[in-house]
Amino acid sequence: MLQKNQFPLRLVEKHFVSSTSMELCFERPDGSPVTYVPGQFFSFHLPESSGGKTRSYSVANRCDNIRENRELRITATLIPDGSASEFFRTAEPGAEVEASGPFGNLILPAADPHRYILVATGAGVAPYRAMLSQLAERLRSNSDLTVELILGVQTPAELLYEDEFRAMAAEHPGFVFRACYSRAEPQQADEYAGYVQTQLQALSPDPEQDRIYLCGNPAMVDDTVKLLTPSGFTPANLKREKYLFSRL
């Protein structure tokens, strides 16, 4: 039985955005808009032939007019033998899948803090990409605002959307991009060796001034919450979303 907010999506195109992740673009067959708040996610209900499982993916769109938006772009990390990964890997343009949403509260508040710290691992950076238009507008209107984006991957080949984040940093002095490599040495000024938690600690997070977002590997999210909670961070200023990987 279909959920109240469930609807079909048709695959339009797909391409790799890193050595391990693919961006897929979907549209509704009836041409209706796909509306959401940047930072939210949709659930994809795989066909029975692909296991009949449900998997959730953050919106990766960059869109200035969401009310008229007719694309849903997601970023999927391809897991060997994963049912969702195999579906996305083999699906051709025209393939249809059921989706529901949007869901989630990993969104920007009405009033900005002094600083946003956006922390991600791998495809967990997708919701921050969707926020870029919003963030650019806020940076233009608030010269005191700072946005720090920290993206952790194993090697440079796994970076996603780094050209867009670096272009954002070049255009807006208040936006800073940091790439963290757990299995490679840095080659550029905005690259660092180690885990995202190390870079986060180097920023001296302040619960009175900062709003922190965490998205990606569950271990990273849990470790970072444990790291920040004693210093006074609460669900009011520490938002999180885990990306669960499953082969089933």
Image: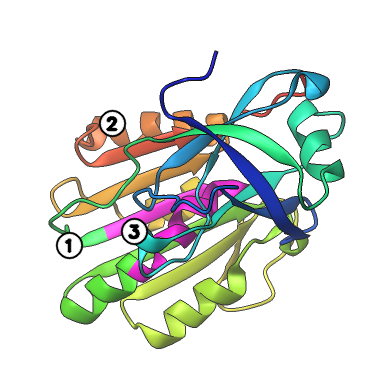
Residue in view at x 61 percent, y 42 percent: 9
Magenta stretch containing residue 191, yes or no?
A: no
Residue in view at x 37 percent, y 48 percent: 36
**Proximity of marks 1 and 2: CB atoms separated by less than 8 Å:** no
The image's mark for residue 114 is: 1
Above or below, 162 relative to 203: below
The image's mark for residue 229 is: 2
Q: Residues within 10 Å of mark 3 (few under 14, many from 20)?
A: few
Q: Residues within 10 Å of mark 1 (few under 14, many from 20)?
A: some
What secondary structure is marked by label 3? helix
Residue 232 shows in the view? yes
The image's mark for residue 63 is: none
1 or 2: tag closer to the N-terminus: 1
How many angstroms separate mark 1 from mark 3 (CA)? 29 Å
Spot occupied by residue 12 in the image (x, y as percentages of width and height): 70, 56
Circle 3 residue: 67
- Residue farthest along the front direction in this orientation: 30
How many angstroms separate mark 3 from mark 2 (CA)? 37 Å
Residue in view at x 16 percent, y 75 percent: 144
How many angstroms separate mark 1 from mark 2 (CA)? 19 Å
Instruction: Name the mark nearer the viewer: 1 or 3.
Output: 3
In the image, taking residue 40 as reference, residue 20 lies left or right, namely: right
The region drawn magenta spans 116-133
Amino acid on which disc 3 is placed: Arg
What secondary structure is marked by label 2? helix
3 or 2: tag closer to the N-terminus: 3
**Residue 43 found in image quarter:** top right
Spot occupied by residue 181 in the image (x, y as percentages of width and height): 66, 57
Residue 224 shows in the view? no
